[in-house]
């Protein structure tokens, strides 16, 4: 049986207006763009020029041109980011990363445990198509898990929790969906860029993930999550922040007290709502260190 937390449309952040650059503004200095089924973030005040903004994640393969065009129209012709910040390195978040890092000569920041998947050293554990829930999950065995190599531009996030290029923000280690997954948090207005620590659509369903995106509160995409204990702890950490606005890697950004109530419900009832009934990583997680995976459970 599938479990979900359905939400009303009125808690979507104000994303109905679309700029000429194809982005959706959700606050004065935060906009997102959806590339098929995954969101990327643009953080910075529009029209401020070169190195005055940052990109969060880099979308799907083939999306570099679309991202460049949006950046030029939003921040100015030739405006390069101060940094590219990664939530994690799965294929749908790094698709244009190498091309953009090269063109913009921009530093790429990620958690130390995520570096092996971004500098060519290691592949992620296999996806798990047995978790159920829809076509996206059934096809998961076909999704690439191999690394990209942006080692020339790659840097670890600062140990003090600060975020390069974003004063007032800090990064949080939200492991579970990947070993070095991070989310980005601005306490002053309680804005949270989640990545895939939790998502606001049913990522396992091709129809929901790509078309309908009905507002729902879900755990991380099941087919790519190798550590459910870590994922639960991360959702608990994020719920405790009491965010006012969340931008997730999949689904609509959400706001207000109804979103927070749904997030708390997800955290308190995580095993029932988020964890699949069966799957390769349900009974024991994959393990990793700073060189890559150290243990992968056998197939179910």
Image (tube, rainbow, N blue to C red):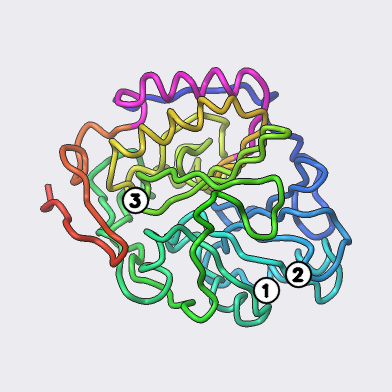
Q: Residue drawn 51% across and 81% down? A: 152
Query: Which one is in front, 59 or 29?
Result: 29
**Label 2 to label 1, Cα distance in Å?**
6 Å
Q: Residue drawn 43% across and 51% down? A: 181
Q: Residue 53, position in %: x, y?
A: 75, 60
Whether tag 3 and tag 1 are in contact, CB under 8 A, the answer is: no
In the picture, the disc for residue 224 is 3
What residue sits right under mark 2 in the picture? 69
Secondary element at image label 1: helix
Q: Is residue 275 above or below residue 120?
A: above
In the picture, the disc for residue 5 is none
Whether tag 2 and tag 1 are in contact, CB under 8 A, the answer is: yes
Secondary element at image label 3: helix
Q: Residue drawn 70% across and 24% down? A: 10
Q: Residue 146, position in %: x, y?
A: 34, 70
**Label 3 to label 2, Cα distance in Å?**
30 Å
Q: Tell whether 190 sits left or right of 26.
A: left
Q: Residue drawn 83% across and 63% down? A: 75
Q: Which image quarter is the N terminus in?
A: top left
Q: Tell whether 2 sits left or right of 283.
A: right
Q: Residue 248, position in %: x, y?
A: 56, 43
| Main secondary structure type of the part rendered in magenta | helix
**Label 3 to label 1, Cα distance in Å?**
27 Å
Q: Is residue 120 on the magenta stretch?
A: no
User: Magenta residues, as a range?
Assistant: 252-274
Query: Which one is in front, 248 or 236?
Result: 236
Q: Is residue 260 on the magenta stretch?
A: yes
Which numbered disc, 3 or 2, marks the residue that appears first in the sequence? 2
Image-quadrant location for residue 63: bottom right
Q: Is residue 92 above or below residue 27?
A: below
Q: Residue 98, position in %: x, y?
A: 54, 76
What residue sits right under mark 1 in the picture? 65
């Amino acid at each position: 049986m599938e479990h979900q937390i359905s939400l009303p449309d009125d808690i979507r952040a104000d994303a109905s207006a679309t700029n000429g650059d194809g982005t959706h503004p959700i606050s004065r200095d935060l906009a997102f763009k959806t590339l098929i089924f995954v969101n990327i973030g643009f953080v910075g005040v529009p029209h401020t020029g070169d190195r005055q903004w940052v990109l969060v994640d880099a979308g799907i393969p083939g999306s570099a041109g679309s991202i460049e065009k949006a950046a030029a129209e939003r921040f100015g012709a030739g405006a390069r980011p101060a940094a590219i910040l990664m939530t994690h390195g799965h294929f749908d978040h790094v698709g244009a990363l190498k091309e953009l890092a090269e063109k913009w000569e921009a530093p790429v920041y990620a958690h130390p445990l995520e570096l092996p998947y971004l500098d060519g050293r290691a592949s992620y554990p296999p996806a798990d198509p047995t978790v159920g829930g829809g076509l996206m999950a059934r096809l998961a065995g076909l999704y690439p898990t191999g690394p990209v190599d942006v080692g020339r531009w790659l840097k670890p996030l600062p140990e003090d929790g600060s975020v390069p290029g974003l004063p007032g923000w800090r990064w949080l280690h939200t492991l579970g969906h990947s070993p070095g997954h991070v989310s980005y948090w601005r306490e002053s207005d309680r804005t949270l860029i989640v990545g895939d620590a939790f998502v606001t659509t049913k990522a396992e369903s091709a129809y929901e993930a790509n078309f309908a995106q009905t507002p729902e509160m879900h755990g991380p995409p099941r087919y790519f999550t190798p550590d459910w204990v870590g994922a639960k702890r991360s959702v608990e950490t994020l719920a405790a922040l009491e965010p006012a606005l969340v931008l997730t890697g999949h689904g609509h950004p959400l706001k207000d007290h109804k979103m927070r109530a749904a997030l708390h419900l997800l955290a308190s009832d995580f095993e029932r709502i988020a964890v699949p009934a069966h799957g390769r990583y349900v009974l024991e997680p994959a393990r990793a260190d700073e060189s890559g995976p150290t243990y992968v459970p056998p197939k179910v």
